[in-house]
Image (cartoon, coloured by chain):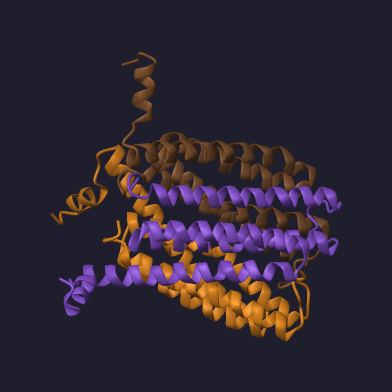
Chain colours: A brown, B purple, C orange
């Protein structure tokens, strides 16, 4: 375990640091716009930063889960690549949302596309493993044989 | 790892798809009830859908964590079964809450009962593993011997 | 897997129970302060309890992720110890925040310090594994040799 998934662990750690960064931005925004806890209502500029962080937090567990399932059951390299793209899209989302509600849309769609790709990888990985474990069927080998590749 | 927990991965993926479905419902509700981000306040019908999604998101990491600990340390088959029941209860919760605040209660209690069951499985699995690893004591074998079963 | 990380699983289970406890406190507070769902606005005493639970929920996935990465890639014993300290700091945070907004600060800083420590452990563990797997370099052995320890 600790040997083969170090790439996934590194991407996960980067994602954790990003979440910590977003949380700190909310703390700074609370001071700047004078919105003391427990209140979460304030000027739109504050609420955009606050909602950006909440949205990223909501998707964070989903992201980490599909990153690891895709990495363990499908391909670690492809998952790590998607993970980095997702983390980058989320930084742009946070910055865009901080400036305007429209500014969040483009990077939000980017992050959603990467997440869907990871979900497809998960589905494929789980399907291949399922056939191998329960049906004793190696779909990739079968496909290669059918195509005359081996 | 990728061989023995494919069932858990499949249930997890189903749970992820459910969360994505809930998120999409909130996006549609924002359009229908004209509640543009970052605002989260609107008519009660919008707020119920919004809160249903937030509540499911809050419990999602807890659900995935107990699903896997129970599956790895106790029984994969029982955990997967509980996982499917939980996912089903959450769909009913979301639909019920969308209609009325009272409508959320029955499926909420169902989902809570399944979650408690998974927590009990986790506790049992961790206890058994703990005794095996640190006390070199196989409780199940001991119990069977005490009952004269072996 | 199920043999070597039973300590991490036990701490994780304790963290799950803590989250369940916080959720129940919000349900009791809803009844006490008469704030029926889906509303989340109410007297400050209710909002503090509500926000305390939301904040703990937000950090919970991050906590579990760094607990396991640190435990698998660095040291299970140190991670479990940090995990227990974090769980204790979060109880004090919840109680402190329930009483006053200022009361949350001290335990919040404690929990943040423990989280940073776990993040450092993760970084160190990932770095050591990365060097071992991809660079065939055992940094700890190299360091000991350089210091004349072996």
Instruction: Tell me: B110 left or right of C81.
Output: right
- Corner quadrant of residue A45: bottom right
Q: Residue at x 63, y 40 (%)?
A: A112
What percent of the width, then of the height, locates residue C119? 44, 58
Q: How many marks?
A: 0
In the rendered image, the residue lying farthest to the top is A148
**On the image, which quarter does residue C52 sit in?**
bottom right
Q: Residue at x 35, y 13 (%)?
A: A148
In the image, A46: left or right of C130? right
Looking at the rendered image, the quarter that the C terminus of chain C falls into is bottom left
When the figure is inspected, residue B55 is found, relative to residue A53, above or below; the finding is below
Residue B2 figure quarter? top left
Determine whether A62 is above or below B138 in the image.
Answer: above
Whether residue C86 is visible, yes or no, is: no
Residue most extreme to the left: C150
> In this view, which residue lies farthest toward the front?
B149
Between residue B93 and residue C67, name the one nearer to us. Answer: B93
Task: Judge left or right: residue A41 versus residue B87.
Answer: right
**Residue B38 location, x and y as percent?**
78, 54
User: Which quarter of the figure is the N terminus of chain C placed in?
Assistant: bottom left
Q: Can residue C139 be seen here?
A: yes
Report the front residue among C150 and B78: B78
Residue C83 location in percent, x, y?
42, 69
User: In this picture, is C12 found above or below A91?
Assistant: below
Q: Nearer the viewer, residue A23 or A71?
A: A71
**Where is residue B77 shown, x and y percent of the image?**
39, 57
Q: Residue at x 50, y 76 (%)?
A: C89
């Amino acid at each position: 375990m600790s040997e083969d998934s170090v790439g996934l662990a590194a991407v996960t750690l980067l994602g954790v640091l990003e979440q910590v960064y977003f949380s700190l931005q909310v703390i700074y925004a609370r001071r700047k716009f004078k919105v003391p806890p427990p209140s979460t209502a304030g000027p739109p500029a504050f609420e955009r930063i606050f909602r950006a962080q909440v949205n990223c937090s909501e998707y964070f567990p989903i992201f980490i889960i599909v990153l690891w399932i895709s990495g363990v059951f499908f391909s670690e390299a492809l998952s790590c690549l998607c993970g980095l793209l997702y983390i980058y899209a989320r930084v742009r989302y946070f910055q865009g949302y901080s400036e305007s509600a429209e500014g969040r849309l483009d990077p939000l769609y980017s992050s959603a596309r990467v997440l869907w790709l990871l979900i497809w990888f998960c589905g494929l990985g789980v399907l291949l493993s399922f056939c191998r474990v329960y049906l004793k069927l190696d779909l990739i080998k079968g496909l290669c044989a059918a195509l005359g590749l081996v």
